[in-house]
Image (cartoon, grey):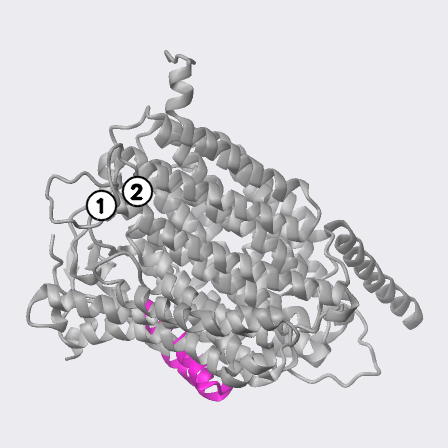
C-alpha cells in the first residue's frame, strides 16, 4: 500500500485516537457502559488498521507472535489471579469486597482488575486471529488481481 | 490454613486447571507445561476425592461465587452424582497426561506440544465446570469452553491424517448447533421463570407443567444436549472425531466428554424439570427408550463391520451410550443408578481400550485391524489389556462391564420389562462379535514376519494397566461403585440436590 | 387452546417471529449449503437469532438502558439477558474464528471447501486404505 498516500496519512492520524478511545472504554467499564471486551477489540483495531496499511511485517516486528500469545494467557491469569487474591484475603472466589476497607470500593477495584484481564486477553486474541489469517501465504499476489 | 483451602475446594477443582492452561502458554516450554498440567490435575483429583468423601452420605455442598448468595449469584453445588463425575474426569485427566506426553511425540509437531497441554487443560476446566456448576447458563459457558478446546484437540490429529480436519469441522458445526439449541432452551425457561439458578428454577417450574414455553424449552435443551451426548441419531460427529483425534485425546474424550453431557441431561431431566411432569415421562418412554434400544443394536452392528479399530470402538461407544440412556429412560432409582454405574465403568473400560489401541498405533503406526495381525505375541501386555477391556465391553463376570449390565438388567426386570432385558443380552452378544474380531487378529492370525515390533513403552502401558486393573478391581468389588451410584441416583431422583445445602467457604450476601 | 390469530397477536409477538425466521434461515443454510464457508455464515445467523431472542426478552416497554441515574423510579430494561448474550457473543466469535481457521487448513490440505468434494476425497482415501490392506493380505498368502 506504499502508493496510497492518503490512506497512510489518515491511518497515522487515526491510530492514536483509536487507541485512546480503547483506553477510555477500558477504564470506563467499572461504573458505566464499556469494559474489557469492547476495549480489547477497539484497541486491537488500532493495530490491525496499522497492519493493513503499513504491512503485516512491520506490525509483527513491533508485536511479535510470541508476545501476542503470551498476552492471551496473561489476561486470563489476571482475571483468575484476581479471584485467587480475593481468596487469599479471606473471601470467596471473585469476592471483591475484601479488596478494600469498604465493600463498594473493593468492588470497584475488583472490576477494574478483571476488566483489565479481559481487555488484555481480547486484545491478544484479536491480534492472534488477525495474524493467523493474514499471515497465511496468499494464493494470489496483490498485483495479480 | 489447610482447612481454609479445603473449604474452597468446589471452586479450586475448576480454578486450578483454568490457571494451568494460560500458565502453560506463558512459559512456552513443553516440559514445564507438562508438569504444570500434571500438578493441576493431581490437585483437582485430590480435591474431587475429598468432595466425594464429603457428599457420599447424601449431603449437598454449596459454594457461593463472588460472595453473592444464590439465586442472585452463581453457585457451585456438589452432590453425590456430580462428585462422582468430577472424580471420573480428573482421574482420566491424570492418566491421560503422562500417556499423552509420549504418544503425541509421533502425532503432533513439537512446536504445538505446549498448546496441546494448554488446550487440554481448558478442555478439562470446561468439563469440571459443567459438572460442578449449579447455574444453568454457566453450564453453557463451560460446555463451550470444553467443546471449543476439543475441536482444536481433534484437529491436531491432522498432522497424521488430514481427515481430522473435516472431522473437527463436522464436530464444530454439530456441537455449536447443539449448544445453541441448549441456549435457546435456557432462554425459554428463563422467560417463563425469571431465574437461572438450578435450585430456584426447579422450585418455580413445578407449577408450570402446562406452560408451552417451558415445554418447548425442555425440548430444546434435550435435543441440544442430545447432540453433545451423541444420542443415537445425533451421533454423526462422534465416530469421525474419535477416529482421527490423537490417541490420547480419543481416550480422554471417550471416557469423559459424553459422560459429562449425559450427566447434564440427567440433571436437567430429574432436577431442573420436575419428575412429576407428564411430558417428561412421555419423552423418556417414547423417545429416549426406543432410541436407546436402537442405538444398542444399530451402533453395535455398525461396529462389527469396521476395519479401523478406533472407529470400531467409537461405534461401540455410541452403543454403550444407549445402555446409559436405557437406564435413564426406565425412570426408576435402580435404572438411574444403572446409568450412573455404567457411566463410571464405561469411562474406565473405554479409556483403557483407547489407551491400549493408542499404544499399538504408537508402535505400528496404523489403526487398521488387519495390520495388527499376530501382535499378541509381540506386544503381550498391550494385547492382554485389549482382551480384558473387550471382555468388560461384553460384560463378562469379573469385569466392570458385568456390574453395570447386572444393575441394568435388575432395573429392567424390576419393571417386568422382559423384552428389554432380552435386548440387553442380545446386544451384548453382538459386542462379542466385534471383540472377537480384535482378539482373532491379535492372537490367531500369523504375524507379519518382516517387522520387528516390541512392547509399547512403559509410559503408555502404565496408564492403560491402571485403568484395566481398575476395571477388574471395581468389577470384583462392586459394592463401592454400586453404593455411590445408588446414593447419586437417589440424590438425582428424589431431588436431594435441591434441599438446603451445607455452605462451603463463606456465605454469600443475599 | 383458545388462540386468536389476529393482527394484534402477530404484531405483539414480532420479536418471536423474527427470531423463528432468523433461526430457521440459519439452520437451513447450515444444512443445505455444501460450501463450508456458507455453513459458518448460516451458523452465525442461527446464533444471532438467539441473541435477538434474549435481548428482546429483556426489554421492558418504556424502559431505558440499565444505567444507574440516581432516580429510583427509573424504569430500565433487564440487564441480565444482555450480560448473558455478551458471553454468548464471545462464544460465537470463538466458534466462528475456529471454524474459519479449520476451513483455511482444510483448503490448504484438500484444495477445496466444498463439502461433497471433501467427502469424495475422504472416501477415495478410505477405499485406498482398504485396497492396500487387501493387496497386502493377498501378497502374504
The secondary structure type at the circle numbered 1 is helix
Q: Name the residue under label 2.
A: B271
User: Chain for mark 1?
Assistant: B
10 Å crowding of disc 1: few (<14), some (14-19), many (20+): some
- Reply above or below: B502 against B207: below
Q: Which of C122 and A133 is in front in this view?
A: A133
Q: In the displayed structure, does residue C129 sit left or right of residue C39?
A: right
Q: Is residue A30 magenta?
A: no
Instruction: Name the residue rendered at 33%, 23% in the picture.
Output: B210
10 Å crowding of disc 2: few (<14), some (14-19), many (20+): many
- Dividing the image into 4 quarters, which one contains the N terminus of chain C? top left
Q: Is residue B24 magenta?
A: yes
Mark found first going from the N terminus, 2 or 1 = 2
Q: Which of B476 and A137 is in front in this view?
A: A137
Instruction: Name the residue rendered at 41%, 61% in the picture.
Output: B127
Magenta span: B14-39
Disc number for residue B276: none
User: Chain for mark 2?
Assistant: B
- Reply above or below: A68 against B295: below
Q: Position of residue B107 (x, y in %)?
A: 64, 77
Residue B481 showing in the rendered view: no
- Dividing the image into 4 quarters, which one contains the C terminus of chain C? bottom right
Instruction: Name the residue rendered at 55%, 35% in the picture.
Output: C24
Q: Position of residue B442 (x, y in %)?
A: 72, 70
Count of numbered tags: 2
Disc 2 and disc 1 in contact, CB within 8 angstroms: yes
Disc number for residue B498: 1
Q: In which quarter of the image is residue A29?
A: bottom left
- Reply above or below: B497 against B370: above
Q: Nearer the viewer, residue B295 or C6?
A: C6
Q: In the displayed structure, does residue B202 sit left or right of residue A133?
A: left
Amino acid at each position: 500500500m506504499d502508493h496510497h498516500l492518503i490512506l497512510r496519512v489518515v491511518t497515522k492520524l487515526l491510530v492514536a485516537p483509536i487507541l485512546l478511545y480503547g483506553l477510555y472504554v477500558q477504564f470506563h467499564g467499572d461504573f458505566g457502559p464499556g469494559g474489557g471486551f469492547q476495549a480489547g477489540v477497539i484497541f486491537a483495531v488500532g493495530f490491525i488498521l496499522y497492519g493493513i496499511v503499513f504491512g503485516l511485517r512491520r506490525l509483527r516486528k513491533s508485536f511479535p507472535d510470541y508476545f501476542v500469545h503470551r498476552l492471551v494467557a496473561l489476561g486470563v491469569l489476571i482475571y483468575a489471579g484476581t479471584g485467587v487474591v480475593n481468596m487469599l484475603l479471606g473471601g470467596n472466589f471473585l469476592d471483591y469486597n475484601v479488596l478494600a476497607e469498604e465493600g463498594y470500593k473493593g468492588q470497584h477495584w475488583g472490576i477494574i482488575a478483571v476488566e483489565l484481564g479481559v481487555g488484555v486477553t481480547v486484545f491478544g486474541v484479536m491480534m492472534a486471529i488477525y495474524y493467523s489469517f493474514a499471515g497465511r501465504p496468499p494464493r494470489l499476489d496483490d498485483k495479480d488481481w | 490454613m489447610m482447612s481454609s483451602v479445603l473449604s474452597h475446594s468446589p471452586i479450586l477443582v475448576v480454578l486450578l486447571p483454568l490457571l494451568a492452561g494460560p500458565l502453560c502458554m506463558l512459559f512456552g516450554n513443553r516440559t514445564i507445561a507438562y508438569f504444570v498440567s500434571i500438578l493441576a490435575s493431581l490437585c483437582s483429583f485430590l480435591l474431587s476425592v475429598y468432595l466425594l468423601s464429603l457428599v457420599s452420605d447424601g449431603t449437598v455442598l454449596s459454594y457461593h461465587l463472588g460472595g453473592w448468595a444464590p439465586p442472585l449469584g452463581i453457585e457451585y453445588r456438589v452432590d453425590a452424582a456430580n462428585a462422582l463425575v468430577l472424580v471420573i474426569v480428573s482421574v482420566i485427566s491424570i492418566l491421560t497426561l503422562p500417556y499423552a506426553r509420549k504418544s503425541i511425540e509421533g502425532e503432533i509437531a513439537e512446536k504445538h506440544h505446549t498448546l496441546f497441554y494448554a488446550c487440554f487443560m481448558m478442555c478439562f476446566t470446561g468439563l469440571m465446570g459443567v459438572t460442578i456448576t449449579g447455574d444453568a447458563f454457566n453450564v453453557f459457558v463451560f460446555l463451550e469452553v470444553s467443546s471449543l478446546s476439543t475441536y482444536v484437540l481433534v484437529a491436531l490429529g491432522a498432522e497424521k491424517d488430514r481427515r481430522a480436519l473435516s472431522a473437527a469441522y463436522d464436530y464444530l458445526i454439530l456441537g455449536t448447533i447443539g449448544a445453541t439449541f441448549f441456549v435457546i432452551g435456557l432462554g425459554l425457561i428463563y422467560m417463563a421463570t425469571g431465574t437461572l439458578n438450578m435450585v430456584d428454577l426447579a422450585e418455580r417450574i413445578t407449577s408450570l407443567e402446562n406452560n408451552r414455553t417451558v415445554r418447548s424449552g425442555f425440548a430444546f435443551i434435550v435435543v441440544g444436549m442430545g447432540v453433545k451426548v451423541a444420542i443415537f441419531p445425533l451421533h454423526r460427529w462422534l465416530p469421525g472425531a474419535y477416529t482421527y483425534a490423537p490417541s490420547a485425546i480419543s481416550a480422554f474424550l471417550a471416557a469423559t466428554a459424553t459422560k459429562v453431557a449425559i450427566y447434564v441431561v440427567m440433571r436437567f431431566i430429574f432436577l431442573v424439570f420436575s419428575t412429576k411432569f407428564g411430558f417428561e415421562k412421555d419423552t423418556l418412554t417414547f423417545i429416549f427408550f426406543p432410541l436407546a434400544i436402537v442405538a444398542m443394536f444399530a451402533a453395535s452392528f455398525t461396529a462389527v463391520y469396521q476395519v479401523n479399530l478406533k472407529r470400531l470402538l467409537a461405534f461401540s461407544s455410541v452403543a454403550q451410550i444407549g445402555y446409559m440412556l436405557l437406564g435413564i429412560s426406565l425412570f426408576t432409582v435402580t435404572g438411574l443408578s444403572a446409568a450412573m454405574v455404567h457411566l463410571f465403568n464405561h469411562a474406565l473400560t473405554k479409556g483403557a481400550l483407547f489407551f491400549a489401541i493408542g499404544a499399538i498405533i504408537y508402535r505400528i503406526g496404523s489403526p487398521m485391524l488387519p495390520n495388527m495381525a499376530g501382535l499378541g505375541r509381540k506386544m503381550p501386555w498391550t494385547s492382554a489389556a485389549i482382551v480384558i477391556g473387550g471382555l468388560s465391553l461384553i460384560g463378562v463376570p469379573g469385569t466392570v462391564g458385568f456390574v453395570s449390565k447386572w444393575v441394568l438388567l435388575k432395573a429392567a426386570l424390576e419393571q417386568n420389562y422382559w423384552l428389554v432385558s432380552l435386548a440387553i443380552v442380545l446386544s451384548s452378544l453382538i459386542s462379542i462379535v466385534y471383540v472377537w474380531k480384535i482378539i482373532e487378529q491379535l492372537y490367531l492370525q500369523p504375524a507379519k514376519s518382516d517387522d520387528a515390533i516390541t512392547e509399547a513403552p512403559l509410559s503408555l502401558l502404565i496408564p492403560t494397566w491402571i485403568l484395566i486393573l481398575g476395571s477388574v478391581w471395581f468389577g470384583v468389588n462392586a459394592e463401592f461403585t454400586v453404593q455411590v451410584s445408588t446414593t447419586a441416583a437417589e440424590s438425582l431422583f428424589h431431588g436431594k440436590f435441591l434441599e438446603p445445602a451445607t455452605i462451603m467457604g463463606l456465605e454469600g450476601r443475599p | 387452546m383458545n388462540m386468536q390469530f389476529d393482527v394484534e397477536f402477530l404484531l405483539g409477538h414480532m420479536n418471536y417471529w423474527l427470531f423463528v425466521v432468523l433461526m430457521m434461515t440459519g439452520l437451513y443454510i447450515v444444512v443445505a449449503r455444501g460450501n463450508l464457508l456458507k455453513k459458518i455464515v448460516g451458523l452465525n445467523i442461527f446464533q444471532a437469532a438467539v441473541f435477538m431472542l434474549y435481548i428482546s426478552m429483556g426489554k421492558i416497554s418504556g424502559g431505558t438502558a440499565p444505567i444507574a441515574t440516581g432516580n429510583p423510579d427509573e424504569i430500565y430494561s433487564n440487564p441480565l439477558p444482555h450480560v448473558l448474550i455478551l458471553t454468548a457473543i464471545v462464544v460465537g466469535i470463538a466458534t466462528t474464528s475456529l471454524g474459519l481457521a479449520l476451513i483455511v487448513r482444510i483448503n490448504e490440505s484438500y484444495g477445496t471447501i466444498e463439502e461433497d468434494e471433501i467427502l469424495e476425497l475422504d472416501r477415495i482415501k478410505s477405499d485406498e486404505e482398504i485396497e492396500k490392506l487387501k493387496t497386502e493380505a493377498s501378497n502374504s498368502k
